[in-house]
Image (cartoon, grey):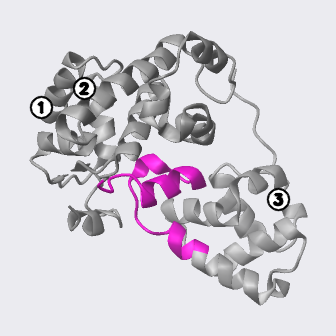
Amino acid sequence: MPAPRRVSKLARLANLGPASEKWLNAIGVYTRHDLEQLGSVNAYRLLKDQGYNASLNLVYAIEGALRRLEWNRLPPGLKAELRLRTADALKPRCAWCGTDPLYVRYHDEEWGVPVHDDRKHFEFLILEGAQAGLSWITILRKRTAYREAFANFDPARVARYGQREVTRLMKNAGIVRNRLKIESAVKNARAYLAVQDEFGSFDRYVWRFVDGRPIRNRWTHMKQVPARTPESDTLSKDLKQRGFTFVGSTIIYAHMQAVGMVNDHVIDCHRYKPLARRR
């Protein structure tokens, strides 16, 4: 049985005429609640992505509708902010980050940026291991809770966790309450300290697997990006031999992408060229 056709209620809102209503319906927006969930800037971005010739005035119109104001009565400061946010939203990006502000910020500010800080490496190892079987956005939303639960990602402190701490973490609704993953984080902290002792830093150890500089790929579409590579296979195998767990090649390749050991932004992404110059 086909799903019932949704009835648009946008005509009740100020500023939105028949054309705007038709466009918004085309991207799944039918009610004020839909519009509030999406926001004016993301609605505009989706319309542009779908090929609609929308102008910046539509952003003002939607924002005014949400604030119950005529679009030309929006405060100048708010209009200036909307202009900046809209310009930022229209920057070409890798498709995987979508429109979620948290995901977009992670894509723009962290993903693919070379990391040379040991605590940051340890943070990503814990988070990538926690992600196994889940989406990365789920882990990003829990990141603050992980920071608190795992001593601000201090491997020396996490390495001292015992069964009492594991039991406590199993009751922490802010993190992924999977005993194997929690115990893995503690075990990995101990293995991490051993690597630091041997090589002076985890950073010095891990970057050897890409000869000390980021691998720069030239993908034109995210479908071309591999889930694992010979380099991640080699690093994964070495980590396992050193006692790490939840470090399969796919997880480790995600880690390599996150810490900038490989630049997997597609070439038309606005972050590709700046990172191509990083080491």
Q: Amino acid at mark 2?
A: Ser
Q: Position of residue 30 (x, y in %)?
A: 77, 51
**Disc with the residue nearer the chain's start (1 vs 2):** 1
**Disc with the residue nearer the chain's start (2 vs 3):** 3
Residue 54 appearing in the image: no
Tell me what residue is drawn at x 63 percent, y 16 percent: 170
> Quadrant of the image for the N terminus?
top right
Circle nearer the viewer, 1 or 3: 1
Circle nearer the viewer, 2 or 3: 2
Q: Which span is picked out in magenta?
A: 85-114
Q: Amino acid at mark 3?
A: Leu
Q: Which mark is residue 230?
A: 1
Q: Which mark is residue 10?
A: 3
Between residue 208 and residue 64, name the one nearer to us.
Answer: 208
Q: Are marks 2 and 3 in contact (CB under 8 Å)?
A: no
| Mark 1 vs mark 3, CA separation in Å | 53 Å
Q: Which residue is mark 2?
A: 249
Q: Callout 3: 10 Å neighbours few (<14), some, many (20+)?
A: many
Q: Position of residue 22 (x, y in %)?
A: 70, 60
